[in-house]
Amino acid sequence: MDLKKLSILILMVEMYVLLSLFNHIKTCEKHLEHMQKQQIIKSFNSEDIVFERMEATPEEIENLPFLKTFRNPCFWTTIYLNKPRLRLQCIPYFYLAGFPKCGTTDLCKRMVTHPLISGKCGKENHWLTRKRFLENNNVLSNYFNYYERSVREDISNIFANGYHSAIFGDCSASTVWDNRHFFKEQKRQNKTKPLLTTADIIFKLNPNAKIIIILRNPTLRLYSDYVYFNKHNVTPEDFHNRVVKGIGAFQTCLRFQNIEECANNFNQKDSVRLNIGLYYIYIGYFLRVFPKDQVKIIKLEDFSVNKLFHMRNIFYFLEVGIPSAGILNRVVDMAKTNNNTEKKTSAGNMWTKTEAAIDSFYKLYNKKLAELIGQEFNYNT
């Protein structure tokens, strides 16, 4: 290649790089302008309180500087786009905390039909209980990412008279019960009590959080859990064998550890998730840190026969107002979600002797649940 052609080639490359840089700057400017219109990014104001610890873990956080003009817990953080700007970040207003196979997916779908409850963040991310313990994932900025679309499209845009009234929630069904990481840490440090539970973490992030928990007869929950999560061909016989093995393993665990340790460390390999049905333990963690008026507990059996009553109560509990009759009718009449009917029908009913064995296993724990939150939650009757 002669010198003239080489010079032309270099010039063309330089022009391409400059054009690409120009287009990138224009794209950033448009993105910045869009976010400013969405009220997600703004210039500094002398009275703004800014949260600067985006790379902190939830355990390290206290007293986030929530904005009074937002019902949802939101605050400003700093970003840098050619100069420092403030960016709006938010954490969940409520937690539909569980339990799995108790109707959380169906309830969540009905809740986000309310015009002030954003459904643009997905149902469950399991970040608080699982994903954050993966390598390099335990910082708050990673949690915020799950809610970016809700913040951008709903929390920022739905406002009247200077007040942003929309909310969103974390509907991860593991939130209420999955404290395995904390108990592993307890064992590693040779402590007699867990350092924290997920309930403590939520309280640290937002002591005013609303907690919703939906329960179901633990025996029926266990069979539904088995049918739904097992990938092999499910049968009543296989379920029975797993139940027998699981009960034996749990009883063995109780010979060497206390009930909390067994509930939170139970190895259900080749058995079933019996521990999840020990509702009183997990609910107790939340009632230990949150006032009772911030924790709403529902029975799936009651919800299924009177959805209108319970949905109205939930909206009232969340302080978002009762929507129009048309929206309420849509909430109540929508088809049930995630009920796994085809697989359940194929599997058939559990054996009577299996049901009796599970009922017997849960009898003491059901009694403790009723003592904790009321006789209407006594699944022994």
Image (spheres, helix red, strand yellow):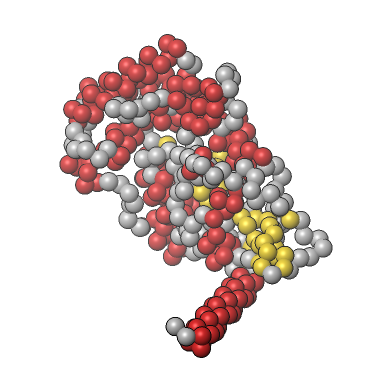
**Residue 235 screen position, x and y as percent:** 19, 33
Q: Is residue 222 left or right of residue 132?
A: left
Q: Quadrant of the N terminus?
A: bottom left
Q: Quadrant of the C terminus?
A: top left
Q: Is residue 181 above or below residue 84?
A: above
Among the 4 quarters of the image, the one containing residue 20: bottom right
* Residue in the image at 63% along x and 57% along y: 89
* Residue in the image at 29% along x and 27% along y: 270
**Residue 30 screen position, x and y as percent:** 59, 77
Q: Is residue 260 left or right of residue 276?
A: right
* Residue in the image at 54% along x and 27% along y: 185
Q: Residue furthest top?
A: 255
Q: Is residue 102 visible?
A: yes
Among the 4 quarters of the image, the one containing residue 357: top left
Q: Nearer the viewer, residue 115 or 30?
A: 30
Q: Is residue 143 above or below residue 368?
A: below
